């Protein structure tokens, strides 16, 4: 469905995307992670055809992506997007008229479920409700590819939970490629199936959450016992306190020797270590 070959984007002397190769062959919920300035928004906008890339090729359903040929099957929304200052119900009706594949019933159902007052004008909504409305309108579109850039920015914990429910319900009703960029790593882990990590414009990792759950773990114990194990393992970071060490691993599981404990690594700790630790992936 999506094929990215050596895609590069430069702004003067700055390389925002550095020869990225990635293939997304099927529907799923994909989480895009990266530090601030890593190139996530550039990646999303380039994929949507909003900005040109300076090298390589991006195709969606066999169609080459470029600003002159923005794929109709892609719907991109970034945080802080605004709508016309009309009533919520009117905005949903307008979206239904302009987009032939728009699921009006889904949009109204989600607006009701999340207590979004459809008689209010857009400017009278709270920031969180404005963002939720934009997310609902975006996800009600049956586009084959939906790109959501920081969709929960400004949400409190309850609204973030509502958004994750919305995301899952949208995917259940209309399976397609959903790519969500976020900093709230452990929360998105509850709904995503695949992880894409970009660092300094490069694709650092693309893997399923199941694979990460299986291969990301921490070995803890005395340094003189742990260190000999690391020669054959992919250690992505370590923490040392005196003679004790916690080694963060992304590799096949091992049977630890006596005195060594094995602990599951959270997705957030995995991200911190693979981006900021000593990575050998």
Image (cartoon, rainbow, N blue to C red):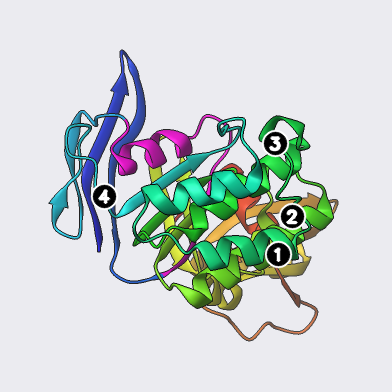
Label placed on residue 4 = none
Question: Which circle, 3 or 1, is nearer the viewer?
Answer: 3
Residue farthest to the right, as pictured: 242
Q: CA distance from mark 4 to mark 3?
A: 29 Å
Q: Is label 1 in a helix, a strand or a loop?
A: loop
Reading the image, the residue beneath label 2 is 160
Labels 2 and 1 touching (C-beta < 8 A): no
Chain-order first, disc 3 or disc 1 = 3
- What residue appears at the point 57 percent right and 60 percent down from the top-left corner? 107
Position of residue 196 measured from the top left corner of the image (x, y, whole percent): 46, 55
Q: CA distance from mark 4 to mark 2?
A: 29 Å
Question: Which circle, 4 or 3, is nearer the viewer?
Answer: 3
Between 235 and 77, the residue placed more toward the observer is 77
Reading the image, the residue beneath label 4 is 72
- What residue appears at the point 45 percent right and 66 percent down from the top-left corner? 207
Q: Is label 3 in a helix, a strand or a loop?
A: loop
Q: CA distance from mark 3 to mark 1?
A: 41 Å
Quarter holding residue 230: bottom right
Labels 3 and 1 touching (C-beta < 8 A): no
Q: Is label 4 in a helix, a strand or a loop?
A: loop
Position of residue 278 measured from the top left corner of the image (x, y, whole percent): 56, 47
Between 100 and 276, the residue placed more toward the observer is 100
Label placed on residue 121 = 3
Position of residue 272 measured from the top left corner of the image (x, y, whole percent): 65, 48
Reading the image, the residue beneath label 1 is 266
* Magenta residue check for 6: no
């Amino acid at each position: 469905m999506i094929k990215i070959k050596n895609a590069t984007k430069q702004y003067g002397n700055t390389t925002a995307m550095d020869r990225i190769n990635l293939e997304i062959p099927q529907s799923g919920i994909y989480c895009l992670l990266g530090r601030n300035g890593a190139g996530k928004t550039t990646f999303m906008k380039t994929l949507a055809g909003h900005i040109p890339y300076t090298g390589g090729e991006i195709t969606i359903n066999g169609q080459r992506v470029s600003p002159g040929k923005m794929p109709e099957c892609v719907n991109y929304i970034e945080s802080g997007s605004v709508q016309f200052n009309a009533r919520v119900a009117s905005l949903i009706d307008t979206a239904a008229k302009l987009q032939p594949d728009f699921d009006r019933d889904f949009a109204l159902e989600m607006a009701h479920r999340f207590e979004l007052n459809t008689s209010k004008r857009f400017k009278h909504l709270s920031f969180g409700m404005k963002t939720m409305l934009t997310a609902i309108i975006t996800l009600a579109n049956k586009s084959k590819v939906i790109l959501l850039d920081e969709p929960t920015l400004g949400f409190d914990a309850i609204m973030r939970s509502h958004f994750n429910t919305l995301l899952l319900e949208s995917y259940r009703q209309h399976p397609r490629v959903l790519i969500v960029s976020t900093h709230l790593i452990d929360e998105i882990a509850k709904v995503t199936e695949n992880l894409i990590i970009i660092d300094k414009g490069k694709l650092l990792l693309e893997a399923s959450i199941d694979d990460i759950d299986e291969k990301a773990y921490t070995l803890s114990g005395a340094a003189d016992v742990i260190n000999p194990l690391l020669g054959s393992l992919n250690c992505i970071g370590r923490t040392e306190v005196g003679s004790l060490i916690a080694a963060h691993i992304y590799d096949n599981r091992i049977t630890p020797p006596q005195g060594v404990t094995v602990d599951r690594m959270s997705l957030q700790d995995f991200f911190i270590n693979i981006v900021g630790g000593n990575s050998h992936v």
